[in-house]
Amino acid sequence: MRYEIELELKEKVLPLDYRRNFISLFKNVIENYNKELKDALYTKSEPKNFTFSLFLPIEKIEKEKIFLKSHTIKLFLSIEEIMLSLHFLNAFLDSKSKKIFLNPENSVEIMNIKKLQEKEIKENYKVFKTLSPIVVREHTREKDIFHLLDEKGIQILKNNIIFNLKDRFPMKFLQEIEIIPMETKKTVVLYYDTKIQVTLGTIGIKADKEILTHFYKCGIGSKRSAGFSMLDLIN
């Protein structure tokens, strides 16, 4: 299920490393609703089957701060499991109109929550656009290495997909996945004080329609529950 959540900031400014603030928002909202649910989601290192993106009306960026044109921003949230989506909806409703601190300098209020219509996938090929940057992470003993959607990055992304979904979908279907960059561009984002390279744009994906639906509902890359790798259907 997909939701559009309207948020009102106290100050029209966010740090460049703003995603960590919104992870804190999620933890705060969910813990106030159900501490056991918060612990189940955030004390395990397993991938979470939800993703989100933010629409920020940016005016300018200066000295690692983002200055906004408006106090109002929008959070787009997509959750695969119906029961988990209902828990998230109730959690955000419970925190509606309450002041929630994002950082020592700023707070936010949840003003409105709207359920969005999901699109049905019936074919085995779809074109998607990124609603948040796609993160491709290669985990090594020494450090994490982040890749773009070039030939090597696509193979690493496929390896990650197979590893994460091998118990859910037939291996034959996972091995047949094709990811085709169409109009993409590189950018660099700040995440927990680390600069990582990511990919924005449009991509085509050939896969079983159930796998495509999973990508649509959960995102396709790494750090999906941290505000990355969210997709929307173009056609």
Image (tube, helix red, strand yellow):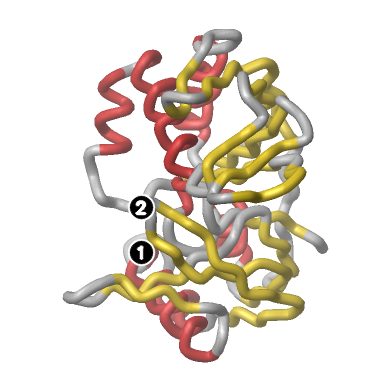
x 69%, y 32%: residue: 73
Classify residue 29 as left or right of residue 167: right
Q: Which image quarter is the C terminus in? A: bottom right
Q: Position of residue 136 (x, y in %)?
A: 46, 71
Badge 2: residue crowd in 10 Å (few <14, some 14–19, many ≥20): few
Q: Is residue 202 shown above or below 68?
A: below
Q: Is residue 205 shown above or below 221?
A: below
Query: Secondary structure beneath disc 1?
Result: helix
Classify residue 69 as left or right of residue 225: right
Q: Position of residue 99 (x, y in %)?
A: 52, 12
Q: Position of residue 87 (x, y in %)?
A: 46, 23
> Circle 2 is placed at which residue position?
47
Query: Secondary structure beneath disc 2?
Result: loop
x 53%, y 78%: residue: 148
**In front: mark 1 or mark 2?**
2
Which residue type carries mark 1?
Asn
* First in sequence: mark 1 vs mark 2: 2
Place residue 74 in its image quadrant: top right
State if disc 2 and disc 1 touch (CB < 8 Å).
yes
x 66%, y 21%: residue: 8
Q: What is the distance, in whole Å, between disc 1 and disc 2 at their CAs? A: 8 Å
> Circle 1 is placed at which residue position?
164
